[in-house]
Amino acid sequence: MLWSIGTFGVYLVAMVAIGLWAYKKTVSQSDFVLGGRQLNPWVAALSANASDFSGWLLLGLPGAIYVSGLGEAWIAVGLACGFAGSWILLAPRLRVYTERVTDARAGGDSDSLTLSSFLENRFNDPTRLLRGVSSLLIIVFYFFYVASGLVAMAALFDQVFGLDPAPAIAIGVGIVVLYTVLGGFLAVSYTDVVQAAMMWLALLIVPVLAITALGGFAGLADGVSAKSDGLLSAVGGTSLDADLGQWVSTETLGWVVIVSGLAWGLGYFGQPHILARYMGIRSVKDIPAAATISVTWAISAMALAVAVGFIAIAYFDTPLSSPEQAFPLLIEALAHPLVAGLLLAAILAAVMSTADSQLLVASSALTEDGYRAFVDRDAAPGTLLWISRITVVAVALGAAGIALWGNQSVMDLVGYAWAGFGAGFGPILLLSVFWKRMTWASALAGMVAGGTTAILWDILDAAVFNTGLYAMVPAAALSFAAIFLFNGLAKVGEQQAADFDRVEAEIRSGRGGGPAAAEDAAV
């Protein structure tokens, strides 16, 4: 345990040190929210990965594979496709659009620092409902999303140190809040780079150690097959029966399970904490390199996480009572205490790298889209900066409450928030950067339809439909339908059309991002 305490201590000190370094560079609200839009390709790519793949990657996915086998990997396939699609389709246009489309109420000199402000500015919404409703959805879903990370954090501290949930969450929240409050977006992004490297290396080292111990890939395959042949089938139905203590055959996976797994990919088009990296990269020219780095990391990391799930099946003779602890249990069983401390710190890194990004976006929604937009438009930059820091603390405390008094798994909490963001924002953001004639009325309708359906679907499905379909599917479908159905309720203004044409011209010409590109586009 002493090795683990020392390793965790060094890691946490390093994160705070990065926060202190970023504090000196964070002097305005723009710096705090988007880091001055100066991320290089490596930082943007790895920060997007680390802020995306939380404890779900190291705990939730291996645990799901452990319980049901290869059938759970459809989620990873959907995520890989969605991540690549968001980098290709959304990242370039969102980067340019959020900087070029300004707030007419602020004299045209305030670019879009948040997704909510972008939506209001993109559609010149006269009602301001787009900004208000979107910021509300962001805050609500991030309470649950941050809570999922804190649940994973509590499980990790319990596994390693035997700590109860309350002190474990208090320690984790304290460190995350400290460096996020200090350095804002830059601190979050640069700590993410370190955390992404730690996560990937841990996912590589554990399988190498385990497969060696099992006698190679043949030993791994034999060990899994001995538990149940269906575990290695992508459509075979197998599940761990906790009462029997063994894997039992179930019905072959139907279209509902496969479609639900693939539908997770749609979520990437609406996750504010990931899209902020697209908005913060220094230039559109850097996006292809960043996309290559990011997607390669994501696919390889998910493949390794799937392998960890199968390795746990083969390695442990007795079925685990808590499948989501498969990865940390393998670390403790296979690695020297010093190495184990480093690998376990990678799990903490996974949790913290997502929680910090989400806290930052939720804080921005409260400050930029709440206080500044509706209370004091002329608030001083220093005032906004400190309000942002205070709201980081407030959101963290709210999420900690959900984590402590809720009773849901990491996978359940992530799935709920992922569907809410994916359906509430994904369809409208995707269409907003490609459809010139889209109006504020259709954007609002799509947001309400998608977000509301994501919130209510599990209740409705259990009471009425009984399909077991992931909420993302009906919620996204209704969002798209509402967008097209209600688009005619408002008209596209001349400024909206001109902004769209200007952004398209900038993208086609290869420019994008930075003052020089703006000046060229205006000529």
Image: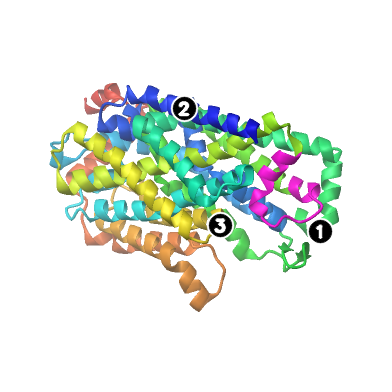
Label 1: element kind: loop
Q: Are marks 3 and 1 in contact (CB under 8 Å)?
A: no
Mark sitting on residue 70: none
Q: Give the structural element (helix, strand or loop) at label 2.
A: helix
Q: Tell me where residue 375 appears, x and y as whole percent.
A: 16, 48
- The quadrant the N terminus occupies is top right
Residue identified by numbered label 2? 43
Where is residue 465 drawn, in percent x and y? Answer: 52, 76
Question: Marks 3/2: CA distance?
Answer: 30 Å
The reply to whether dot 3 and dot 2 touch (C-beta < 8 Å) is no
What residue is disc 3 on? 409
The kind of residue tagged 1 is: Ser
- Name which residue lies at 44% across and 42% down: 173
Asked whether disc 2 touches disc 1, contact meaning CB atoms under 8 Å apart, the reply is: no
Closer to the observer: label 3 or label 2?
Answer: 3
Quadrant in the picture for the C terminus: top left
From the image, give the main secondary structure of the stretch colored magenta.
helix
Residue 134 magenta-drawn? no
Mark 2 is surrounded, within 10 Å at the Cα level, by few (under 14), some (14 to 19) or many (20 or more) other residues, namely: many
- Residue on which disc 1 sits: 228
Is residue 290 in view from this perspective? Answer: no
In the rendered view, would you say 354 is above or below 126? above
Q: Earlier in the sequence, mark 2 or mark 1?
A: 2
Q: Is residue 168 visible?
A: yes
Task: Give above or below for 361 relative to 267.
Answer: above
How far is mark 3 from mark 1, CA to CA? Answer: 25 Å
- The front one of 333 and 490 is 333
Report the Cα–Cα distance between label 2 and label 1.
42 Å
Report the span colored magenta.
Answer: 311-333
Total residue callouts: 3
Expressed as whole percent of the image width and height from the top left, the position of residue 360 reads 36, 40
